[in-house]
Amino acid sequence: MNIQQYLLESFKKYKDDNALFTYNTYYTYNQLAELSYKLADTILSIKYIKQPVIIAGSRSLYTHAAICGALIAGSYYTPLNETFPVERNVNIIKLSNAKIIILDYTDFLCYEEVLNNLHDYHIICPVEQYDYLSEKFPNHTFYTAKKYNNKFLSVEKDDTAYLLFTSGSTGIPKGIKISHYNLSSYIQAFVKRNSVTNHDKIMQMNDLTFDLSIHSIFLSFLFGACLYVPDNSCKINPNKFIITNEITHILMVPSSLTIMRKLRLLKSNSFQSMKYIAFCGEALPFNNAVLMAEAAPNAKLENIYGPTEATIACTYFEFNKNTKELTEYTGSMPIGKAYDGMEVFLIDEDKNIINNSVGQIVLSGKQLAKGYINNEVQTKAKFIKIDNKDCYLTGDLGRYVNGALVFLGRNDAQVQIRGYRVEIYEIENAISKIENIVSNAVIPTPVNSITYENLTAFITVKDDNIDTYQIKSILSQTLPDYMVPNKYIILDNMPLNSNGKIDRNQLKNMIK
């Protein structure tokens, strides 16, 4: 079954139940459905059939109805992030080849700068925003959601459901299309292991541009659960929000757990309402995970793993407060075994399949995307055939320990910062363009940690008169905040290894 059909059936079945809690207001499935249908009909009236729809919003009913409306119309969606630099959001719009933007400007703070950098787009907005926007931005055509006739385009399983962009080493984001088949395969594999009902309350901890948000949104809307969308302060410290709203399901990055531990919020039996907790996006520190298991005694806990290219997550490891830590885990919780419909194995540098040593993690199966849009070089490099199977080379290293796969970091310059996948080369490329900088190298910190929270940039300059605050300001204009180094160290010369390359191990030793 495709996601469009799932949504249509769910809207009818759960029409009187709460679908969404956001900005301290509840909305029913009937309210979500009515607005979603109107937006779908408006999308179809603009005639860009089965094309991407840009979502410019974050938390509102209108934004979530826009996501549903795009899929119901037979199109697919690409979200923006109001915290991203304007240039990055504009690049995402252009790379997607979208012609339609659904905008709620009360829910997307940087809308003016984005619209001023574009021309001739079709923009759908709330009726109360129409007059203001159409007058202020005459270079675009504006629409409001129309009455609907329930005649939508049918969707095939290989049609795209969403398009997300990840960091690219050249500075150009890489676009990944995920199909209805990919997403429904993920959902079916998940619910085979874990229950979701119309009595559940699912907390959305992640921005729409982070694919973990898709887990929370669709597991809510397809099964009649209520999606709870907190403000940013609650995402940093979700403790009170979870308890007050009796949240039952949550998916978070391990960095959030680290913050909760530092604030001493992981108290035994404090999260009585929780039924399911998952962690994804970066390595999960073992000790923190066990503390959460003690804090949520009624919850099933899983550490799940997977890149955007394989639809949210594709391996899982179930654990509890009694799970024993092994030395071979290197301080983190294992990522376990493959979802139903997926296959995970390890290869050596010659792409031979191996079993009993460290190797690169390779994925194959129903959830796998077909490649990157308009990027044949990267597609050929990462999406390959092994034993006549379509596979994706993750660039992650792993090893099997007692039958469970353990994540051992990256084999290239890509790292996870606060749950986001980041190409170090993209940051270094941006720094190299700044005047007076001769060379640079970026190191994730804390050094030798299993999770990274910040970045340190080492730089050499033409003269000593350089303002590191200005460097940070310049980078903030083109990079998201999680990709902007928080610390800068100026060197006379970069340390080099025997191959003449920057010796990153020496740089790591310089970081206190």
Image (tube, rainbow, N blue to C red):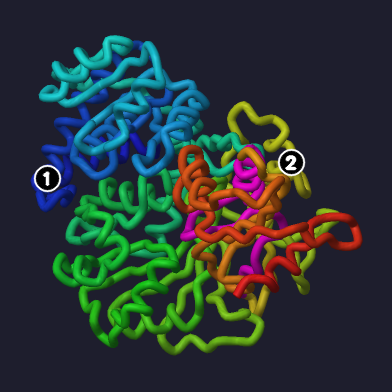
Please give the range of residues in magenta: 404-433
Q: What residue sits right under mark 2 in the picture?
A: 381
Q: Tell me the kind of residue under disc 2.
A: Ala
| 419 is within the stretch colored magenta | yes
Q: In this view, does 29 lie to the left or right of 260?
A: left
Q: How far apart are marks 1 and 2 (CA)?
A: 45 Å
Circles 1 and 2: CB distance less than 8 Å? no
Total numbered labels: 2
Q: In this view, does 176 lie to the left or right of 296?
A: right
| 407 is within the stretch colored magenta | yes
Identify the image quadrant of residue 344.
bottom right
Residue at the (33%, 53%) spot, across then down: 216
Identify the image quadrant of residue 5.
top left
Give how far across and how far down residue 486 sits, in percent.
50, 58
Residue 428 lies, with reference to residue 147, above or below; the image says: below
Give how far across and how far down residue 400 sits, in percent.
68, 73
Q: Considering the image in quadrants, where does the C terminus appear?
A: bottom right
Q: What residue sits right under mark 1 in the picture?
A: 27
Q: Considering the image in quadrants, where does the N terminus appear?
A: top left
Residue at the (58%, 61%) spot, across then down: 456
Of labels 1 and 2, earlier in sequence is 1
In the image, 22 versus 491, the foreground residue is 491
From this viewpoint, is residue 471 visible?
Answer: yes
Give how far across and how far down residue 432 sits, in percent.
66, 42
Residue 273 lies, with reference to residue 468, above or below; the image says: below
Residue 183 lies, with reference to residue 99, above or below; the image says: below
Q: Tell me the kind of residue under disc 1.
A: Tyr
Element type at marker 2?
helix
Identify the image quadrant of residue 326.
bottom right
Give how far across and how far down residue 496 sits, in percent.
83, 60
Residue 295 lies, with reference to residue 500, above or below; the image says: below
